[in-house]
């Protein structure tokens, strides 16, 4: 649906009636943790804040149910490993 240029790796889309904000993270390996593990409380707050700004700029979507997903990509093989965490965190903004 949209990508927020202020939040690299983030985007918004719809899953039926649910508005979905997605944070995408990648790493070359899991040596220092998985990409999903890098979405800490500070990053969650930033994603939620970007979602609020997006909703203000797109009032037609205000009031819809929303969720926050995280997609982690690890590039240590062919094909890369992809982990999709649905409803990974609440609106912490």
Image (cartoon, helix red, strand yellow):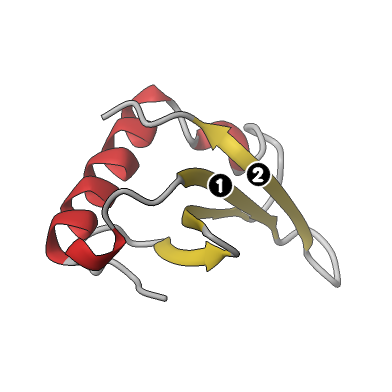
Are the two marked residues, 1 and 2, in contact with CB atoms closer than 8 angstroms? yes
> Which residue lies at the image location 71% right of the left edge and 61% below the top edge?
75
Where 65 falls versus 38 (above or below)?
below
Tell me the distance, in whole angstroms, between the alpha carbons under discs 1 and 2. 5 Å
Q: From the top left corner, tell me how far across and down residue 11 is, in percent.
A: 41, 64
Toward the viewer: 12 or 6? Answer: 12
Per the rendering, the mark at residue 69 is 1
Where 70 falls versus 75 (above or below)?
above
Q: Which residue position is annotated with label 2? A: 86
Q: From the top left corner, tell me how far across and down residue 83 is, in percent.
A: 74, 50
15 to the left or right of 13: right
User: Residue 62 is drawn in which quadrant?
Assistant: bottom left
> Which residue lies at the image location 18% right of the left edge and 62% below the top edge?
59
Tell me the crowding category of disc 2: few under 14, some 14 to 19, or many 20 or more residues within 10 angstroms, Cα based.
Answer: few
Toward the viewer: 17 or 2? Answer: 17
Tell me the crowding category of disc 1: few under 14, some 14 to 19, or many 20 or more residues within 10 angstroms, Cα based.
Answer: many
> Which residue lies at the image location 33% right of the left edge and 62% below the top edge?
8
Q: The N terminus appears in which quarter of the rendering?
A: bottom left
Q: The C terminus appears in which quarter of the rendering?
A: top left
């Amino acid at each position: 649906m949209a990508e927020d240029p202020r939040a690299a790796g983030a985007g918004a889309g719809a899953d039926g009636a649910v508005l979905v904000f997605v944070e995408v993270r990648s790493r070359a390996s899991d040596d220092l943790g998985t990409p999903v593990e890098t979405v800490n409380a500070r990053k969650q707050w930033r994603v939620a804040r970007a979602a609020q700004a997006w909703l203000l700029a797109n009032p037609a979507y205000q009031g819809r149910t929303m969720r926050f997903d995280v997609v982690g990509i690890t590039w240590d093989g062919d094909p890369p490993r992809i982990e999709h965490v649905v409803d990974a965190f609440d609106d912490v903004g």
